[in-house]
């Protein structure tokens, strides 16, 4: 949809991540016959953009299984309605955990046939819990604050991890464009781990910082924090690094001339 674009009819990476998480989550829920929540995402690279009007097809495959968790490989292909051949946009391995009605890990009854998959290391982070708003590190700033809506829930009432990913991408895009002073497009995402879930009653804040820069790229570190229902406790949900590249009107990489 036009509302999901970032520039020049390019669909945001956050929208695609959200759809991939939904597809993977649906596969996970069907497989376990109950609830499954997103707990991790391996590093991903974007091979090509998606434009308004493209047909996007998402494929899922269970590649690993643990006692209560499963890794699902999700591939996204795009095809222009003008008749071009389908091309792979990106792929990633999402990890889901089967949970019971109390939100506790629950053993999976069935066993998936193991399939070799690219291994990635999720970057661990401190699972902080504060009774006040997080203290910002030098160079860090609040880029986005929002709340999830009922439509962001899956069939079991949990907020999609993809919704959090989409908001993180939006926050990173805001910071990248602010830093570059022009158009920036996403090209990669670091591995991530979800430490805690988000509910529709939470206020979620996204803090960003410039992690490193290249000739035409900037890496933005994004932290997601949830203010819980009691309006007193702040918990870190996840964090990750998003790589953006500065591009010209022809979508070719250009050197960065920082404006801030």
Image (cartoon, rainbow, N blue to C red):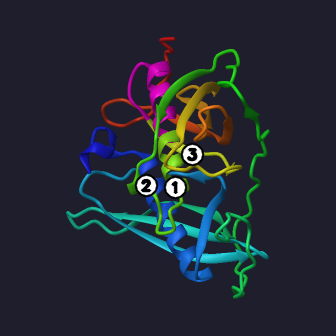
Counting other residues with Cα less than 10 Å from the Cα at mark 2, is it few (<14), some (14-19), or many (20 or more)?
Answer: many
User: How much space separates mark 2 and mark 3, taking CA atoms?
Assistant: 24 Å
Frontmost of labels 2 and 3 is 2
Regarding mark 1 in the picture, which secondary structure is present there? loop
Q: Closest to the observer: 127 or 15?
A: 127
Q: According to the image, label 3 marks what residue?
A: 188
**Placement of 120 over or under 113, stated as above or below:** above
Q: Is residue 182 magenta?
A: yes
Q: Closest to the observer: 152 or 48?
A: 152
Q: According to the image, label 2 marks what residue?
A: 152
Which residue is painted at 72% across and 81% down in the image?
A: 108
Tell me which numbered mark, 2 or 1, is placed earlier along the sequence: 2
Estimate the x, y position of residue 223 in percent, counting from the top left. 63, 35
**Placement of 139 over or under 82, stated as above or below:** above
Counting other residues with Cα less than 10 Å from the Cα at mark 3, is it few (<14), some (14-19), or many (20 or more)?
Answer: some
Q: Residue 116, which numbered label?
A: none
Which residue is painted at 52% across and 33% down in the image?
A: 172
Q: Is residue 178 magenta?
A: yes
**Placement of 133 over or under 230, stated as above or below:** above
| Residue ranking furthest to the front | 230
Magenta stretch: dominant SS? helix
Counting other residues with Cα less than 10 Å from the Cα at mark 1, is it few (<14), some (14-19), or many (20 or more)?
Answer: many
Q: According to the image, label 1 marks what residue?
A: 159
Boundaries of the magenta span: 169-184
| Residue ranking furthest to the left | 82
User: How much space separates mark 2 and mark 1, taking CA atoms?
Assistant: 6 Å
Regarding mark 2 in the picture, which secondary structure is present there? helix
Tell me which numbered mark, 1 or 3, is placed earlier along the sequence: 1
Regarding mark 3 in the picture, which secondary structure is present there? strand
**Quarter of the image where one finds residue 93:** bottom right
């Amino acid at each position: 949809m036009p509302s999901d674009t970032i520039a020049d009819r390019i669909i945001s990476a956050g929208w695609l991540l959200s759809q991939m998480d939904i597809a993977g989550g649906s596969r996970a829920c069907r497989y376990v016959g109950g609830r499954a929540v997103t707990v991790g995402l391996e590093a991903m690279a974007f091979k090509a953009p998606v434009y308004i009007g493209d047909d996007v097809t998402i494929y899922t495959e269970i590649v690993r299984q643990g006692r209560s968790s499963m890794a699902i490989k999700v591939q996204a292909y795009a095809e222009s309605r003008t008749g071009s051949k389908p091309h792979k946009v990106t792929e990633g391995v999402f990890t889901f955990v089967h949970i019971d009605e109390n939100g506790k890990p629950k053993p999976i009854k069935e066993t998936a046939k193991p399939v070799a998959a690219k291994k990635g290391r999720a970057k661990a982070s401190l699972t902080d819990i504060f009774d006040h708003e997080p203290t910002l590190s030098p160079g860090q700033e609040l880029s986005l604050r929002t709340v999830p809506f009922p439509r962001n829930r899956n069939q079991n009432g949990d907020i999609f991890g993809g919704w959090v990913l989409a908001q993180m991408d939006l926050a990173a895009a805001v910071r990248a464009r602010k830093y570059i002073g022009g158009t920036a497009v996403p090209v990669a995402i670091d591995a991530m781990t979800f430490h805690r879930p988000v509910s529709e009653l939470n206020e979620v804040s996204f803090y960003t910082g410039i992690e490193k820069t290249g000739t035409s790229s900037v890496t933005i570190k994004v932290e997601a924090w949830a203010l819980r229902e009691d309006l007193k406790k702040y918990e870190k949900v996840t964090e990750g690094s998003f790589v953006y590249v500065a591009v010209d009107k022809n979508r070719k990489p250009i050197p960065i001339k920082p404006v801030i």
